[in-house]
Amino acid sequence: MLPQDLDNWLSAAAFYPLHDTVVDGGSICRNVVCENTTGDRLFVKYLDKAPTNFFQCEAEGLSYLQSASNVNTPKVHACGANFLALSYIPPQHHSADYWETLGRQLALIHSLTRDLHGFANDNYCGNRVQLNRQHKDGYEFFISNRLLPLAESALDRRLIDVGDLQAIESLCLRLDALVPEQPASLLHGDLWSGNVHVSERGQPVFIDPAVYFSWAEIDLAMTRLFGGFDQRFYDAYEEVRPLERGWRQRIHLYNLYPVLNHLLMFGAVYLGQVRGILSRYS
């Protein structure tokens, strides 16, 4: 059953769900393609009793990412408390230069910098609130908005033990020795392979952002979390925006944040991955 606000909007906009249309999606929202009498289609994601401003944050992130960097994102057609209606992009094959284009586009996104790490408001990574309280110091931002709040929540829920928390606290104390100083760049914020779609022309389309400003290496680390992107992507990125030496050795450190987030969303199946990361920096 569709949420009532979505059902109301579809009726008013004269769209109807194509329930036989198979749509790949994430593990949080349900998705459906909707069509009107002239054959126009929309991709609609929905979640009954969604968290406060859940879809609004995603809509704002898409608009911000597109307007700031001019990359492709789905157009937002409507946003409600429990749904988001976007332009429909049917599955396509990559163009020959897909990975190079994606690398250059991300490098240009990361070239947009500001003085403060964080964002004007909190948003969501998955279905959990992502804290974006602004800091001039990137280390303080990563500690107080990313690692420690999630570690403390995981301890409260008995997903980690005191020893794990102490290991995370120890890592935080050494963060400035492990991570070089970097500007606060515009980030996609949740850049795994499932959050880049392919346009009708075979070009990249960024979806499901959790935007904020911080270290560019955080986005690049996320691209390696679930299988990694093609090497052509990284080569093209570095042609536009060369990376600091040793960035690959910092990948696991940055990915402690999304792995902790997954631990809180999906449970103890991610505990081994958390402890594996901590053992690298012990």
Image (cartoon, grey):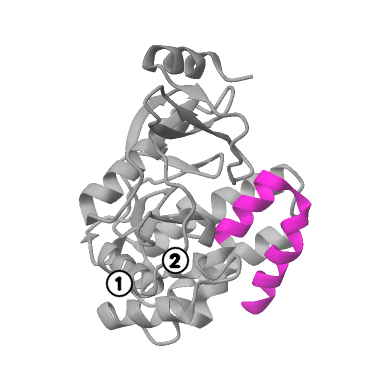
Residue that protrudes farthest toward the front in the picture? 38
How many angstroms separate mark 1 from mark 2 (CA)?
16 Å
Q: Compared with residue 234, is residue 50 higher up or lower down, i.e. above or below?
A: above
For residue 266: magenta? yes
Q: Compared with residue 7, is residue 46 higher up or lower down, i.e. above or below?
A: below
Q: Position of residue 182 (x, y in %)?
A: 32, 71
Query: Secondary structure beneath disc 1?
Result: helix
Q: Position of residue 77 (x, y in %)?
A: 34, 30
- Callout 2 amino acid: His
Q: Is residue 251 left or right of residue 207?
A: right
- Callout 1 amino acid: Arg
Is residue 151 at all visible to an observer of this figure?
Answer: no
Q: Which mark is residue 104?
A: 1
Q: Position of residue 187 (x, y in %)?
A: 36, 58
For residue 236: magenta? no
The residue located at (36%, 44%) in the rendering is 74
Query: Secondary structure beneath disc 2?
Result: loop
* Prevailing SS of the magenta stretch: helix
Q: Nearer the viewer, residue 6 or 144?
A: 6
Q: Nearer the viewer, residue 120 or 133?
A: 120
Badge 1: residue crowd in 10 Å (few <14, some 14–19, many ≥20): many
